[in-house]
Image (cartoon, rainbow, N blue to C red):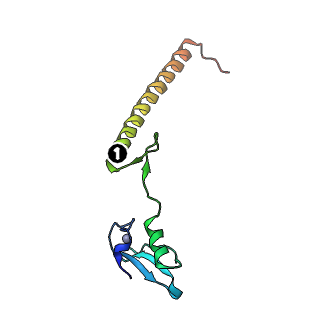
Amino acid sequence: MNKSSELLPCPFCGCNETGIQKGYFGHAIPACTNCGASLPLCKNAELAAARWNTRAEVYIAHPITGEPMDKSQCKRVITQMADQIKYLKEQLGIVHRGAKTLTQMSIVEGTHEKT
Ligand SMILES: [Zn+2]
């Protein structure tokens, strides 16, 4: 491996054990020696470093705004969504129970009609 300082930390394990492995005919492979993450063979070390350092960032987008979120924002949004789902389930339960009650009432009164 060449100088690890030219590559950004590994996006998978976060360590700085990254470097460029030499391939045949001057080709190069940017890789992490800690977890084994690597990119396909590149023409030279410069290109290998550029590809490793300019890969797309991975993030979770906000479900409504589409903005990238950090971990604390993710946790907050997930909690809000869980609360919302719980609320909707409760509302659905009330509507369901209401509909059942209405059906039972109309059967008892003899007004229930089949369509
Ligand atoms: Zn790694």
Q: Where is residue 13 in the image (x, y as percent from the top left)?
A: 35, 67
> Mark 1 CB in 8 Å range of ligand 1?
no
**Within the image, what quadrant is residue 85 found in?**
top left
Disc 1 marks a residue whose amino acid type is Gln
Please say whether residue 34 is visible from this viewpoint. Answer: no
Q: Where 78 falls versus 24 (above or below)?
A: above
Q: Position of residue 86 (x, y in %)?
A: 39, 35
Residue shown at the point (43%, 28%) measured from the top left: 91
Q: Position of residue 20 (x, y in %)?
A: 42, 79
Residue shown at the point (47%, 25%) measured from the top left: 95
In the image, farthest residue toward the front: 46
- Quick check: which quadrant has ligand 1? bottom left
Please say whether residue 4 is visible from this viewpoint. Answer: yes
Q: Look at the image and tell me in which quarter the N terminus lies.
A: bottom left
Q: Look at the image and tell me in which quarter the C terminus lies.
A: top right
Residue shown at the point (44%, 72%) measured from the top left: 49
Q: Looking at the picture, tell me which residue is in the foreground, 52 or 101.
A: 52
Q: Looking at the picture, tell me which residue is in the foreground, 12 or 48.
A: 48
In the image, farthest residue toward the right: 115
Left-right relation of 115 to 18: right
Instruction: Tally the numbered discs.
Output: 1
Q: Where 100 falls versus 34 (above or below)?
A: above
Q: Where 66 falls versus 14 (above or below)?
A: above
Q: Looking at the picture, tell me which residue is in the foreground, 87 or 17.
A: 17
Q: Where is residue 82 in the image (x, y as percent from the top left)?
A: 38, 40
Graded by Cα atoms within 10 Å as few (under 14), some (14 to 19) or many (20 or more), the crowding at tag 1 reads few
Callout 1: helix, strand or loop?
helix
Q: Mark 1 points at which residue?
A: 73
